[in-house]
Structures are given as C-alpha cells and as structure tokens.
C-alpha cells in the first residue's frame, strides 16, 4: 500500500504535493518523495520516514515547477530500510521519465530477467516499481517513431505495459517535455481518481490514490480512472484518456474499504465511511442470529477505522456505545510496521485504556480486521487489566487466511493468525471470551449496496481467489521463502545503518 499524487497546475506545485502527501500519509509511513519539473529539468527530493521528517524548507525551495508527482510508501517488495527504494524513480531514456507506483507486480522477477537479457536494462534496487518504470521506458522507446513524444505513442506504450506486467498497479509518471501520465491495472485492484480545478489561468488537474486528496486540496472530483485506462495531461493543460488494455475486469481491493482507505474517501463510486457503517449493520445481524446468548454491557471500537462499524452495530443491537481507548497520534499504524517486534511493542504505546469504561463490564470490542493477531491479543489483555468482566471480540471483516500479493504487507500465511486455525482456536489464541467474524458475502454486499455495478472484488486474502489468475502454489511458496530471507537481512541492515535522503536535479530534453 502506497499513496501517489500527480499534479498539472498553473502555479508552483511543491506545496500542493507536500500537502497532498500529508493527507495520504495513512497509506505509507516508510518513505516519501516529491519530483517536479521546470524548464526541461526534473527536481526531486526523497527519503525514509514520515512526510514531515523527509522534507525541510530548504528541500521545498528546490522543488520548483508547475507539475509534478509525489509518493509515500511502505514496503511490500524490496527492503523496509533502504532509502534508495524511496520513490519516485528516474530513468533518462527515452525522453526522461519519473514514476511513482502503488501496488505490487506479481511477475517482477521474470520482468527483471527479461529487461536485462532482452531489453538491456539494468535494475539498481529490489523494488518492483523500478522494474515497472523500465518496462514503461522500453515500451515508449519501441513505440517511438520520431524524436518527439505524442499522445498516440504514449498510449501505445501503456498498452505494451499492460501486456507484459502482471499484478496490481496504479501509476503516476512524468514524461519530460510532454506532461503527466497516469494509468491503472486492467483489474482496477488499486484505486486511482482524478480531479480538476478551474482557475483564471486555465484548468488544473490532480490524480491521486484517494478522493480525500482531491477534496482537501481544493479540486473537484471528476471520476475514477477505469481499469486499464490511461490519463494524459500535457504541459498546455490538455486532458485526454484512452482504454489501453485488451481485456479488463473491475475488481477493486476489498481491503481498501475494510481498512486501508480514509473514511472520507470515495473509491469506485463508493463511500468508504458508508461501507463501514454497512459492515456494522451486517455484523450486528449476524451477532443477533448466531450468538443471542451473549450478554453485552457496552460496545467499544478499536480506533480508528472500526469506529463507524462499531457505532452502527451498537445502534442496531440497542447497546451503549463508548470510547474505551485513547489513541496516541504520534505512533505509526502497527499493521504496517516492518518488524513483528516493533508491532508488539508499539500497541501499548499506541493505545491506552480508559479504565472506567471497562471495570466490571461485559465488553464487545469491534475491530476492522484481525490480521496477525498481535494487536487483538494485546488489546484484549489491556481490557482485562482495566477490569473487564468479559471480553468479546468482533471483526468487521472475514478471517484473513491467505497471502495478499497485490500490495498489502501480509504476504505469507505463516504470519496470519487465521491461516491454519479455526475460529474457536483463534478465539483462544487472542484470549477472547467469544469471537465473531463478518461473512464474506455480507462484506461484498456492504459495498454492492452502495454501488450495484461492482460485481467483482479482489478478496484474495479472505478466500484465496486471485483475480489476475497467475498466482500458483509455487509462487506463494517462493514469496514466503523470500520474505523469510528479506526479514533477516532487513533487520541486519537496520542494525548497521541509519538510512538517508536524496536530492536530485536532473537535466532532461525539452
């Protein structure tokens, strides 16, 4: 999961891109980067850490230009500790390209070999985003029939990318001397939206991972980028788009609605907030029918993403709703921290119980999901220490039993508490007195109720069905082995280095 932005404006965009990254910070806390373009030159600064820590005033002064792209990331491919893998990535030929990517390529290793042996291109990092950039560069070179780039050539190159690349990807890219390119994979797994802003100097356009960036930056929402579609905005502000994939299927990632996206975002025509309210409604109905014997005194959410579901569940069941945990806003999301030890340590730093809301009560805790079980176990322990008589636990999503290979940091089944356990075993493992999960059909219905045109979803982490159709048992076994080696080398690397930041000013052809 990453956050991406692309802007074509009539004024300087450095501050706009910075503010946009702040809004999308929930999508990645590992690294951040901004690249702008002015007078045939790319300007870039990127590094490890939060957006506020990567950029200083001196860095922002150098990010001049009326168009640019930005990225915040946490790692799903590559190293969690390497500042060299912060995005955007740059390649100088053809024309000069900058690219930022949200998602995960499932054939990255094969592409890397092909790029070296057939296309004579070298990769300098382990990031699949660098692979994607070089595939795009090669396809642009193949499509080029003259020295200057045009829209037809670019769309032809994106079509070539779709033919070669497998997996999930939402992309923003800068083509030197021409403009801003954005495109989405043929399954629409990762989100991408576009907005516009009419000014006296002309129309401005913004492409982003979530609509919340469009809203808060003063743009008006236009639409989602369709699966397989490419959007192109040239330096004169002309907006064109084209379907570049031969075959498409609209199957957005269900985990965006469950956890990843901000509640004030719209994704594929669906309000994330309303979806989570519906999750609470369906979860309440299941609780009423399957566990009518439970005596519950109070419903308490695990902040923040489970709050809408917990409130609606309490309303539907006629139960008191209370805030029982105070969240420390300065601790990162435990789910996306790179090491298990970091996750365990940070839970109690992140949340503190309000004892009065637990003492002597039978409490129903509601969370958006249970992934590794680390957070759930610690929170239940905290509730008991605060004096809860009984602690029941409800998950607004189904059990996460399978690896996610499309850009979420849970790639191996060995890390998932539900992978090889029954619901009763999970309940005992996390220390709850009772456990209830959302049904997958109900979760799908929560989204479809708000947009009936959505008939397919990527629910692979719940049901093991991978919509791209290219994921084998051998592939999953391979990433599990690679993950084990990566974790060890990453921790060794983290012990020996502090990381760094990179400023880059690149001359490109106009």
Image (spheres, rainbow, N blue to C red):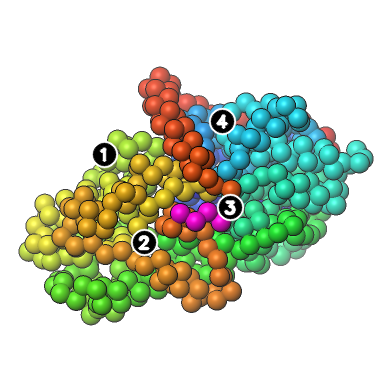
Residue behind mark 3: 469
The residue sitting at 83% across, 39% down in the picture is 142
Question: Is the residue 465 above or below the residue 502 in the image?
Answer: below
Q: Earlier in the sequence, mark 4 or mark 3?
A: 4
Q: Position of residue 463 (x, y in %)?
A: 43, 58
For the residues labelled 4 and 3, the Cα–Cα distance comes to 24 Å
Between residues 501 and 89, which one lies in front from this camera angle?
89
Of badges 1 and 3, nearer the viewer stands 3
Q: Which mark is residue 126?
A: 4
Distance, label 4 to label 1, CA atoms, is: 28 Å
Q: Which residues are magenta?
A: 464-469
- In this view of the protein, which residue sits in the foreground, 314 or 464? 464
Q: Residues within 10 Å of mark 3 (few under 14, many from 20)?
A: few
* Any part of residue 207 in sight: no
Pointers 3 and 2 in contact (C-beta within 8 Å): no
Q: Main secondary structure of the magenta part?
A: loop
| Identity of the residue furthest to the top in this view | 496
Q: Measured along the vertical axis of the image, is residue 217 above or below residue 111?
A: below
Label 1 and label 2: CA atoms lie apart by 26 Å
Residue 398, numbered label: 2
Q: Position of residue 38 (x, y in %)?
A: 75, 40
Check disc 2 and report its element: helix, strand or loop.
Answer: loop
Per the image, the residue denoted by label 1 is: 345
Q: CA distance from mark 4 to mark 2?
A: 32 Å
Q: Secondary structure at mark 3?
A: loop
On the image, which quarter does residue 502 sit in? top right
């Amino acid at each position: 999961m990453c956050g991406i932005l692309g802007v074509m404006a009539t004024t300087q965009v450095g501050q706009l891109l910075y503010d946009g990254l702040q809004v999308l910070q929930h999508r990645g806390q590992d690294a951040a980067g901004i690249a702008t373009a002015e007078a045939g030159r790319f300007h870039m600064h990127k590094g490890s850490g939060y957006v506020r820590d990567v950029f200083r005033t001196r860095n922002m002064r150098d990010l001049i230009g009326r168009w640019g792209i930005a990225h915040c990331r946490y790692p799903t491919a590559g190293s969690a500790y390497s500042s060299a893998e912060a995005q955007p990535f740059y390649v100088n030929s053809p024309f000069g390209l900058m690219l930022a990517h949200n998602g995960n390529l499932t054939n990255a290793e094969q592409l890397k070999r092909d790029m070296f042996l057939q296309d004579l291109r070298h990769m300098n990092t382990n990031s699949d985003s660098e692979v994607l950039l070089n595939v795009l560069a090669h396809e642009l070179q193949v499509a080029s029939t003259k020295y200057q780039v045009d829209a037809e050539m670019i769309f032809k190159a994106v079509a070539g990318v779709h033919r070669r690349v497998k997996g999930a990807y939402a992309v923003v890219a800068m083509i030197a001397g021409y403009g801003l390119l954005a495109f989405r994979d043929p399954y629409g797994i990762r989100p991408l939206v576009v907005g516009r802003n009419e000014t006296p100097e002309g129309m401005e356009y913004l492409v982003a991972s979530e609509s919340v960036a469009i809203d808060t930056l003063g743009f008006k929402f236009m639409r989602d980028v369709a699966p397989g579609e490419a959007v192109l905005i040239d330096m004169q502000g002309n907006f064109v788009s084209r379907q570049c994939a031969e075959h498409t299927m609209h199957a957005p990632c269900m985990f965006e609605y469950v956890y990843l996206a901000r509640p004030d975002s719209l994704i594929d025509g669906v309000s994330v907030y309303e979806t989570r309210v519906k999750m609470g409604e369906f979860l309440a109905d299941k609780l009423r029918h399957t566990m009518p014997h439970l005596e519950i005194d109070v419903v308490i959410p695990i902040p923040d993403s489970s709050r809408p579901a917990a409130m609606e569940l309490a309303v539907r069941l006629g139960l008191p709703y209370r805030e029982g945990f105070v969240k420390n806003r300065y601790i990162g999301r435990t789910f996306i921290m790179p090491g298990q030890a970091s996750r365990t340590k940070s839970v109690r730093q992140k949340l503190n119980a309000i004892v009065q809301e637990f003492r002597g009560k039978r409490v129903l805790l509601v969370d958006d999901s249970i992934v590794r079980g680390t957070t759930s176990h610690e929170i239940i322990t905290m509730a008991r220490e605060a004096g809860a008589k009984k602690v029941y636990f409800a998950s607004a999503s189904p059990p996460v039993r399978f690896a996610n290979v499309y850009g979420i940091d849970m790639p191996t089944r060995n890390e998932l508490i539900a992978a090889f356990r029954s619901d009763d075993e999970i309940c005992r493992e996390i220390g709850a007195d009772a456990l209830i999960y959302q049904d997958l059909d109900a979760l799908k219905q929560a989204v479809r109720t708000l947009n009936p045109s959505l008939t397919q979803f990527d629910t692979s982490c719940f049901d093991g069905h991978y919509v791209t159709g290219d994921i084998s048992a051998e592939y999953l076994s391979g990433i599990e082995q690679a993950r084990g080696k990566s974790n060890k080398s990453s921790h060794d690397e983290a012990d020996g280095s502090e990381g760094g930041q990179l400023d880059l000013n690149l001359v490109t052809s106009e």
